[in-house]
């Protein structure tokens, strides 16, 4: 299996995982975030497919961090309390860890890639970093909902 096939399968698996998480949560805001993450994985799959077949494509930067900020704002304003069980929290941790492994995968492969491929892998590594930050925020939300939502910024990651 070549690097693109492997990476495309990784993104497809990520999409399926996020779709399952979206179906398993009762919170509408978090369901929306997981659906957006699944859509991002589809976008990554298509970027990789185009790169594999050497179809040039302009890679647009993800707006997921900005978009989810609005969802977190709505969560705070709604006052809705959401307390997922330990099993659900573990699924979120697993998703976060998968994003970190994906980021490292793309960074490692960028070191050995041709110039055009290197750029793609570095951009995908950056996208995975954003997903990691988003999932870290969800984990903080479910671990400390009162203090997390009370923070006026309620978005705890710096934007780079």
Image (tube, rainbow, N blue to C red):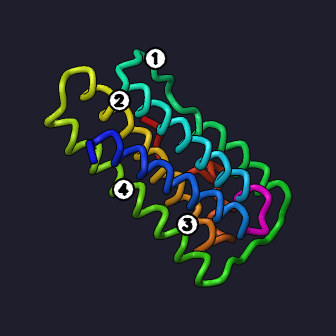
Q: Label 4: few (<14), some or many (≥20) within 10 Å?
A: some
Kind of element beneath mark 3: helix
- The stretch of residues the image draws in magenta is 25-30
Report the mark closest to the observer, 1 or 3.
1
Q: Earlier in the sequence, mark 3 or mark 2?
A: 2
Residue position for label 1: 58
Which residue is pictured at 83% across the width and 63% down the height? 79
Frontmost residue, 127 versus 154? 127
Numbered badge on residue 80: none
Kind of element beneath mark 1: loop
Task: Measure the alpha-carbon separation of dots 1 and 3.
Answer: 34 Å
Kind of element beneath mark 4: helix
Residue position for label 2: 52
Residue position for label 3: 140
Residue position for label 4: 100
Frontmost residue, 33 versus 46? 46
> Do residues under tags 4 and 3 come within 8 Å of each other at their CB atoms?
no
Does residue 110 sit above or below 21 in this rendering?
above
Frontmost residue, 83 versus 152? 83
Which residue is pictured at 33% across the width and 57% down the height? 101
């Amino acid at each position: 299996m070549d690097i693109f096939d492997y990476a495309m399968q990784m993104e497809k698996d990520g999409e399926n995982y996020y779709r399952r998480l979206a179906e398993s949560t009762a919170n509408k805001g978090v369901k929306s975030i997981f659906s957006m993450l699944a859509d991002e994985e589809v976008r990554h799959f298509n970027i990789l497919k185009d790169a594999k077949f050497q179809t040039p494509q302009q890679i647009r930067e993800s707006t997921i961090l900005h978009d989810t900020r609005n969802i977190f704002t709505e969560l705070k304003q709604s006052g809705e309390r959401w307390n997922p069980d330990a099993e659900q929290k573990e699924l979120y941790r697993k998703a976060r860890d998968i994003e970190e492994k994906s980021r490292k995968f793309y960074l490692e492969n960028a070191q050995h890639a041709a110039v055009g491929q290197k750029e793609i892998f570095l951009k995908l590594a950056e996208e995975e970093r954003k997903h990691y930050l988003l999932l870290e925020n969800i984990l903080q939300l479910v671990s400390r909902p009162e203090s997390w939502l009370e923070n006026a910024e309620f978005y705890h990651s710096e934007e780079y």
